Image: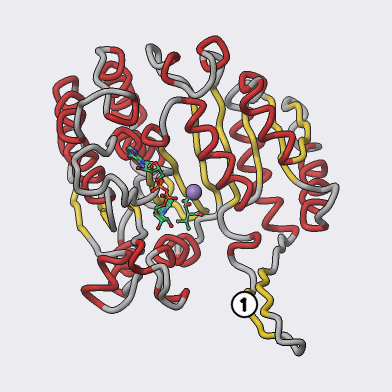
Amino acid sequence: MKLAIFPGDGVGPEVTAQARRVLERIDLPGLTIFEGDVGAAAFRRQGHPLPAETIAMAQAADAVLFGAVGDPECDRLERSLRPEQAILGLRQELGLFANLRPASVFAGLEDLSALRPEIARSIDLLIVRELGGDVYFGAKGIDKRADGEREGWDRMAYSEHEVRRIAHVAFRAASGRNRRLTSVDKANVLETSQLWREVMIEVAGEYPDVALDHLYVDNAAMQLVRAPGQFDVIVTGNLFGDILSDQASACVGSIGLLPSAALGERQTAHGTFGLYEPIHGSAPDIAGTGKANPLAAILSAAMLVRHSFSRESEAARIERAVAGTLAAGLRGADLGGHDGTQAVGDAVLARL
Ligand code: NAD
Ligand code: IPM
Ligand code: MN
């Protein structure tokens, strides 16, 4: 089992170090770990945020564990050299179009949600975010018009096959859960969303056991804080999924708790190839303070073990150890406590 770890910037190395300890502790025979450079760290060492050797390392692996990229000092670089291009480039190079972002409230954390506890308790949802298209990967630019005015623009587009393949991922996920799928779009304004909705309805015909409904994204954002318990699986485009998943994390308690899996079509000898990362970024405001919550990274490692190494029992063991750690009262600063990154990692390891 070959695993590539790309720690990246800011809190990325701090949280992936804890996830690595967890992966080394559980029973994964023949696990080999390689570490590679991404983001501002890679730019400083090698002159590019996504060096060719990092891409090659990912392609040779069965799975990638990713920390985070982003550095305020790099925000004025030309776009192709910015740290964020590392994660966007990996998703594209590796054909990772399906992003699973589960969100549910851990027992004992109901009071730490941004929502009232009785509302928070009901949250058990999965966001299926399309990851390979939308306004993220279209042409873009800042042009000077004839009248001297500058104009910024980004092309938003989805082709039929891109919507169809993410629809199948979402319907299959809903079939294995509570068989309710909500497609989130902005079809009242955007033609991209009109096609999205039409294709979702077409694919629904193949999944008679799943109930499909549609929400406009503004309403979805409102429903997510008003009554999040109504959602089982949400499927949405790249941009809306990015925004709604950060919002879901605050409903659960902290962005330091939400993991993700980016999957494509490639199968390896051990499972589905994938890239796993917390949904949060490099958190420059707390980097180096030892305060970052490593649980999103550790839960990402659990998803990795489940999908890419096909070890359901070991994945569930990690998730139980995380739940147990929280139930025992360990809390980082993001959850109103004082336990640091290392202490939380130690507690999870002790439970394993
Ligand atoms: P962020 O997710 O890094 O941080 C948002 C807030 O959440 C900050 O207050 C931060 O301290 C807090 N936070 C994040 N992770 C935490 C953790 N594990 N424990 C405790 N608190 C945590 O988002 P941002 O500030 O908008 O972006 C910072 C940089 O990260 C930017 O350069 C951005 O582009 C990048 N980014 C990268 C990724 C990625 O690598 N996948 C994801 C999001 C943002
Ligand atoms: C995420 C991040 C990335 C995204 C950025 C860093 C490119 O916000 O993974 O949620 O927008 O996809
Ligand atoms: Mn994001």
Residue toward you, 111 or 204: 111
Which quadrant of the structure image shows residue 69? bottom left
**Residue 6 appears in the figure:** no
As drawn, 25 above or below 9: above
- At which x and y percent is residue 99? 52, 46
Q: As drawn, which residue projects farthest toward the front?
A: 148
* Along the viewing direction, whichever of 290 and 213 lies nearer the viewer: 290
Kindly indicate the quadrant of the structure image that contains residue 182: top right
Residue 22 pos. (x, y %): 20, 35
Work out which residue is located at the far top of the displayed protein and give it.
118
Q: Amino acid at mark 1?
A: Gly
**Residue at the spot 67% in from the left edge and 20% down from the top edge:** 230
Q: Is residue 54 left or right of residue 290?
A: right
Q: Is residue 121 visible?
A: yes
Left or right: where 60 falls relative to 101: left
Against 284, residue 158 (above or below) is below
Farthest residue, direction bottom: 146
Q: Is residue 151 above or below residue 320?
A: below
What residue sits 47% from the left and 55% below the top?
Answer: 266
Q: Is mark 1 within 8 Å of ligand 2?
A: no
Dot 1: element:
strand
Q: Which residue is mark 1?
A: 141
Q: Position of residue 120 (x, y in %)?
A: 53, 17
